[in-house]
Image (cartoon, rainbow, N blue to C red):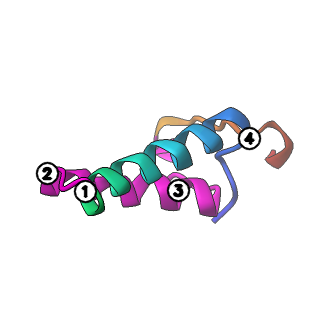
Amino acid sequence: MKANVGGIDRILRMVAGIALIAWAAVLGGPVWAWVGVVPLLTGLFKFCPFYPILGISSCSKCE
């Protein structure tokens, strides 16, 4: 698993993930808001499984 998520992409993923999880857990948002776990984990691990399929990498230092 080579890192392919970096920089602003990583920060945006983690912020969006935390916001969705907080909405579901704290504010009683819809069940689908738990999908925020996915962007949070991809930001934390610096790896998105769809990026290699699409030939994308937002991590310039990882290449």
- Label 2, on which residue? 30
Question: Which residue is pictured at 58% across the width and 53% down the height?
Answer: 43
19 in magenta: no
Question: Which residue is pictured at 17% across the width and 52% down the height?
Answer: 32
| Mark 2 residue type | Pro
Q: Residues within 10 Å of mark 1 (few under 14, many from 20)?
A: some
The numbered mark, 1 or 4, whose residue comes first in the sequence reads 1
Question: Which residue is pictured at 53% across the width and 44% down the height?
Answer: 15
Q: Nearer the viewer, residue 47 or 40?
A: 40
The numbered mark, 3 or 4, whose residue comes first in the sequence reads 3
Q: Are marks 3 and 1 in contact (CB under 8 Å)?
A: no
The numbered mark, 3 or 1, whose residue comes first in the sequence reads 1
Q: Are marks 2 and 1 in contact (CB under 8 Å)?
A: yes
| Mark 1 residue type | Ala
Is any atom of residue 28 visible in this view?
yes
- Label 1, on which residue? 24
